Amino acid sequence: MAAYGDATSSSELVSSPDPNHPANLICELCRCFYQLGWVTGTGGGISIRDDQHVYIAPSGVQKERIAPEDIFVMKPDRTFFRKPARPLKHSACTPLFFNAYDLRQAGACIHTHSQHAVMATLLWRGKEFRISHQEMIKGMRVAGTGKALSYLDTLVIPIIENTPDEEDLREGMEQAMKDYPDAPAVLVRRHGLYIWGKDWTSAKGQAECLDYLLEVAVKMRMIGLETEGLPV
């Protein structure tokens, strides 16, 4: 992605005719995720890192109606380059997004409230979601290396417990990322998931693949099928 750090004013940080500018991409992706049911009721969000600028969608707003001027821009040290002119709150997901940037050197992080993710955390009562022998596993990547998983690999995603306040999930997510260094995502019980990638295309593609796998796994478990291995 091109670097947009040479803007000369606060407004120019989020104002560009380039459709690939992070502020424009966040608005487009939020509309896409709204249609998928991932960010309904103002929940969920996305952040994109571009060099020394971290673009973050605001919190508590209708995600499908976000405009570029509503985007927050932060520095890697968590101070602000710019805030929107209208009174908006930066995302409560911000500390979780920075987990992905600090621990995985990610280029983007997505937070969804997908019902498939929530259901999976209810059916997998332990600390892991596991699935193998599904074609869509090929769309997942090993965190850090970017290596693609194979049909024969077992995808393991850690599950952490929810907290009353979103920002309080930071430590649990951080520990799960340390305990599962290969995992490209973290599930939050009764809440949703966080998933990241080296850039926004990787994060989006993996989010779509994982949501598909979660939906399939939930359906398999509900009819008594195992999600690991092949039936004998």
Image (tube, helix red, strand yellow):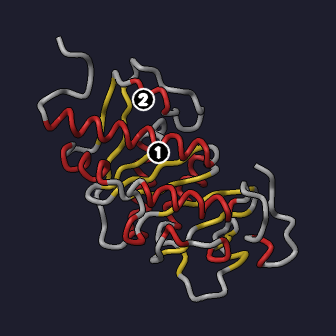
- Amino acid carrying label 1: it is Ala
Which residue in the structure is indicated by mark 2? 136
Where 122 sits versus 28, above or below?
Answer: above
Q: Quadrant of residue 29?
A: bottom right
Measuring from the top left, give residue 90's x and y in whole percent. Answer: 55, 76
- Disc number placed over residue 3 in the picture, else none: none
Considering only order in the chain, which callout, 2 or 1, is on the residue closer to the N terminus?
Answer: 2
Measuring from the top left, give residue 65's x and y in whole percent. Answer: 53, 72
Horizontal side of residue 113 vs 197, given as left or right: left
Measuring from the top left, give residue 30's x and y in whole percent. Answer: 52, 61
Indicate the quadrant containing the C terminus: top left, top right, bottom left or bottom right. Answer: top left
Measuring from the top left, give residue 22's x and y in whole percent. Answer: 69, 60
Dot 2 falls on a residue whose secondary structure is helix
Residue placed at 70% from the left, 68% from the top? 75
Which residue in the structure is indicated by mark 1? 207
Residue placed at 17% from the left, 35% from the top? 221
Residue placed at 40% from the left, 22% from the top? 153
Dot 1 falls on a residue whose secondary structure is helix
Circle 2 packing at 10 Å, graded few (<14), some (14-19), many (20+), is some
Horizontal side of residue 103 vs 5, given as left or right: left
Residue nearer the viewer, 140 or 96: 140
Residue nearer the viewer, 64 or 166: 64
Residue placed at 12% from the left, 33% from the top? 223
- Amino acid carrying label 2: it is Met
Circle 1 packing at 10 Å, graded few (<14), some (14-19), many (20+), is many
Residue nearer the viewer, 198 or 113: 113
